[in-house]
Image (cartoon, helix red, strand yellow):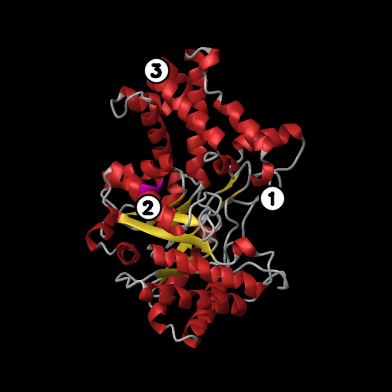
Amino acid sequence: MANVVSRLSGDEVAAKKLKGIYSICSAHPWVLGAAMEQALDDDTPLLIESTSNQVDQFGGYTGMKPADFVRFVHLIADRVGLPRSRLILGGDHLGPNAWRSLPAEEAMQRAEALIDAYVSAGFTKIHLDTSMSCAGDPARLSDDVVAERASRLCAIAELAAEREGRSEKPVYIIGTEVPVPGGAAEELDTVEVTASNAALDTVAVHRIAWRGRGLDDAWQRVIALVVQPGVEFDHTKVVEYKPELATELSGVLEQLPGMVFEAHSTDYQKLESLAALVRDGFAILKVGPGVTFALREVLYALADIEAELVASEARSNLREVVERVMLAKPGNWEKYYHGDKQEKRLLRTYSYSDRVRYYWADPEVDAAAQKLISNLADITISENLLSRYLPEQYWQFRRGLIDASPMSLVQSKIREVIGGYAAACMA
């Protein structure tokens, strides 16, 4: 397992400390700052990934192109004090996902430009995701078509790395059983684990596609396969990892030297489940909505504290602002949340898919969040109020691990989640 970490980071010493590596899939600066603080404390590399929806050659929903995202992450790292050399930048679900409504060839041409922009900007971990159907495609693509399209994108990545003179060539993640980004929209009770023969077939068909394009050198840098270990979450519950159901799948790695499994949608798993996933070969753990869910929890708790301490006319009214903006701009949630008015209201705030995360960069929401932090920075938050609204942070404060400033509380809450992943990955 340490081998894949060293291949990602180039840091043999740090790799010896790790059995796996977690991937922070977020573009929120407070989340990224908390993750960097965790990496500093642990003295480990940090893997940060942007998705094809967040960041693309047109700006994505964050407004950032790949080179913009690199600068954005580097600025935060410089502020926190994490050496840039300790950062691993990855691109998640890179492929035609954003252009599925277009004919396949047009969508793939845009995906090629996407891959070129990511590699040119310095991203080194590339998840090639061509599993989705485009206009004119059958509802489900064959493994042969997925592999051929993935190899086409790999060739573009290799050319970009050569053109830019990158000494560190990209490493690749492949796989056709890719969970829906952000969690399932439908209610789930169980999730089918990838069959062992399906995993082996996927690798075999991709190997053939790579060979057909003369990408033998690049194939040596295919380090992981995305599979479904039986973990997922819907809006209100989590499907927990059950090691006994993934035993046969885990055994497949014996036939895939140099490769590990990458597990998506590991958000909200129990700490012991995360550790079991790493132990069983799912050495790359992706987390996205789970960290921004924690961010929303702490900001709303701070808004409740603000209501206790700040005059009504001076409050940020963060919760009300978020709700108003989400109702005025429903494009990021309305096709995912169903039910009557009350059910949708609850999902907008509390769904595990955490589609609130799409709104933190909205100017009105950002202004309210900044006002909340500013209001509470000028006030002493007493420990008994922390006990009421942020009980875990209350005990950290009592033990002298954090202070009661709003940003310290925000970082602490986010690191509750990230710390669990860090513990699961440590040797």
Between the C-alphas of marks 1 and 2, the distance is 37 Å
Q: Residue at x 48, y 85 (%)?
A: 213
The residue tagged 2 is 71
| Residue 167 versus residue 92 in the image, above or below | below
Q: Is residue 394 visible?
A: yes
Instruction: Name the N-terminal-most of marks 2 and 3.
Output: 2
Which residue range is magenta in the image? Answer: 421-425
The overriding secondary structure of the stretch rendered in magenta is helix
Estimate how packed mark 1 is, as few (under 14), some (14 to 19) or many (20 or more) residues with alpha carbons within 10 Å. Answer: few
Q: Position of residue 163 (x, y in %)?
A: 37, 75
The residue tagged 1 is 186
Estimate how packed mark 3 is, as few (under 14), some (14 to 19) or many (20 or more) residues with alpha carbons within 10 Å. Answer: some
Q: Quadrant of the C terminus?
A: bottom left
Secondary element at image label 3? loop
Q: Is residue 352 visible?
A: no
Q: Disc 1 or disc 2, which is closer to the eye?
A: 2
Instruction: Name the N-terminal-most of marks 1 and 2.
Output: 2
Instruction: Name the N-terminal-most of marks 3 and 1.
Output: 1
The residue tagged 3 is 381
Q: Position of residue 73 (x, y in %)?
A: 38, 50
